[in-house]
Amino acid sequence: QVQLVESGGGLVQAGGSLRLSCAASGRTFNNYIMGWFRQAPGKEREFVASMMWSGGSTYYADSVKGRFTISRDYAQNTVYLQMNSLKPEDTAVYYCVARRAVVKEFNYWGQGTPVTVSS
């Protein structure tokens, strides 16, 4: 069973940085797409970033391009989201997600880690 456990959220001032981590376990992820979603209070869940576990192209929401970077560490079986130049509108619960590349929607979700950006 796939398990995704996020960490690294917290309170940061606008303009600051945070790095979220997602420890993935339960299987090998070579044919998986890993990613991050977020949900702000009162808003719908939205895509943030994704990448193939095996490497290659990365994808970002327009709202975070140039500020956020998704990456993974094979040895640690961990996916990261480096968030720079944070804005108050980045405040949300951030979820690590995974799916097999042949599956249309992300069907594995972590429990979420909250990020609050103060102005």
Image (cartoon, rainbow, N blue to C red):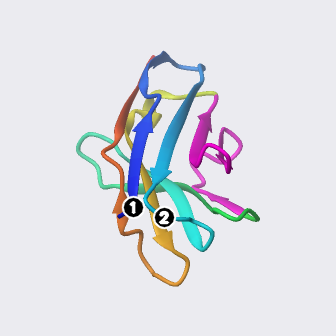
Closer to us: 6 or 82: 6
Query: What's the residue type where badge 1 is placed?
Result: Val
Residue bearing mark 2: 27
State yes or no: discs 2 and 1 in contact (Cβ < 8 Å).
Answer: yes
Residue at 54 percent across and 60 percent down: it is 34
Q: Is residue 78 left or right of residue 75?
A: left
Q: Secondary structure at mark 1?
A: loop
Query: Looking at the image, which residue is at 23% across and 44% down?
Result: 42
Relative vertical location of residue 31 with respect to residue 22 in this rendering, above or below: below
Residue shown at 46% from the left, 81% from the top: 103
Q: Position of residue 114 (x, y in %)?
A: 35, 32
Q: Quadrant of the N terminus?
A: bottom left
Residue stretch rendered in magenta on the structure:
58-84
At a point 52% along the width and 29% down the height, the residue shown is: 87
Mark 2 neighbour class, 10 Å CA radius: few under 14, some 14 to 19, many 20 or more = few
In this view, 98 is above or below 93? below
Extreme bottom residue here? 102
Which residue was labeled with disc 1?
2
Mark 2 is on which residue type? Arg
